[in-house]
Image: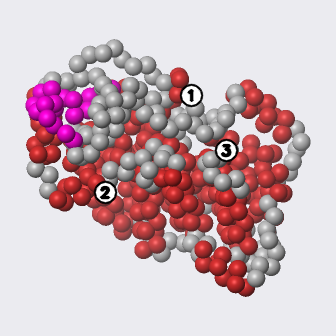
Amino acid sequence: MFRSVSSVPSRKARRTLIALLGAFSLTLPVVTTASHSAALLDLDAARPLAKHDASRLVVPRAPSAEALATMSARWDAQPPIAWSEIALEAIAKYRLNPLRAARLLAHLHAALHDAWLQCAPREDDARCPRIAQHVAAARVMQHFVPAETPGRFMSLAVSALAAMPAASSHQTALEYGAVAAWGAILRSLDDAADRSLEAPSRPPARPGTWRPTPPLFAINPTERGAPLWRTWLLTGGNEVQPPAPLAYGSAAFVAEMREVLDVNRRLSADQKRIADEWNLDLGTASPPGVWNRHAIRIARAHQLDAAATTRLLAALNVAMFDALVACWTAKLRWWSERPVLEVRERLDASFEPYIVTPPFPGYVSGHASASGAAAQVIAARIPAARDEVMAMAAEAALSRLYGGIHVRSDNDEGLRLGLEVGRLVVERLDARTHSISR
């Protein structure tokens, strides 16, 4: 399965490094108190680390008219939209699982958000946030995808900046972008995503406990350490949790297993389409990536400006990340069985799910959790889209029943969990940003 690609120093070493760098007293622009309080990242800790990055970024001068036209067309989209697509390509290329994809996207869009936020007081220069966002995104992508061609992401940022007219706040914007990027990088080094060996222990074997499932037969669940990961706006993965799953062997439990078998025996063409479209296995943009594409499509349809799009995508991605950490906390609390083995042993030895059963416990559904959080955020930011996104989230949850890999309660409770996480994320973000124009 996916392994962390960063080489992470010890916590003591990281703190020593930050303290030493802070001793140089490098001065970077300071944002207003209102903006600073609304940041998603610790910008103060990042300032000493950012000065060097900003000073090394050289933007080509006076590109030819032809080159300028080419670059302008390439970067016509708002920076958060353009960098989302770049990130989704990397997620598919490097086969990131949904949790790792959500982690990358959350850090990327938090950096894009805070880069924009620092420029907010400079209302006289609309280019400041675009410059800062390109720099922040390139540096974050470089950190999270080090296997990519060296310099590729920063080269993309340089091409974007070269396509823009000169800005009076150019150097300041570069520094804002570097500060936001280093805020995200520092957070990623201390979010526990590399502490998989400290994962919750497997419970004693008993009837109904998750077992390796065909065809993968993985001994350990994917991202077993995820319940330890640091959340963004929840207090932790335990803050939002589902009720206990159905009692193993109960009449309701058996009825749900029988529903999986009955549904899979008579799948319609439309149900197969839904199962296929929401399958999103490794090598795709993953469920968080698909929800980014839906959010971008809806934002464009409703003509959101750059600031609103930045806020939307930041909220969307931190909500999906927090929902998936809460989901995995439930999965590795209950260690519930997947339908494939239960249906074969109880009802039909020849049962084959329509899609491949992923290698981790069932209760609750990760697709449903991420989709509920995403739909709640989009509905809150674009109320006119509520019916559309809620229907999509319900379909994403139901797709796992059609696929034969989840019982109905896995999906229903996962969707409820995601909706609640999305509600809390929006509420807490709004409490932070009440003094920022929205």
Residue 113 in view: yes
Q: Looking at the image, which residue is at 60% across and 66% down?
A: 79
Disc 2 target residue? 277
Q: Considering depth in this image, is 335 or 46 the residue closer to the camera? A: 335
Q: Which residues are magenta?
A: 335-353
Disc 3 target residue? 185
| Mark number, residue 374 | none
Q: Looking at the image, which residue is at 10% across and 43% down?
A: 262
- Considering the numbered disc 1 on the image, is that residue within a helix, a strand or a loop? loop
| Contact flag, marks 1 and 2 (Cβ < 8 Å) | no
Instruction: Using the numbered discs, state the Cα–Cα distance from disc 2 to disc 3 in whole angstroms.
Output: 33 Å
Colour treatment of the image: secondary structure
Where residue 21 sits in the image (x, y, percent)?
Answer: 84, 39
Where residue 314 sits in the image (x, y, percent)?
Answer: 54, 55
Q: Viewed as shown, does residue 217 lie left or right of 59?
A: left
| Mark number, residue 195 | 1
Up/down of 224 relative to 287, above or below: above
Q: Determine crowd level at label 2: few under 14, some 14-19, many 20+ residues with C-alpha closer than 10 A.
A: few
Where residue 215 sits in the image (x, y, percent)?
Answer: 30, 35
Q: Determine crowd level at label 1: few under 14, some 14-19, many 20+ residues with C-alpha closer than 10 A.
A: some
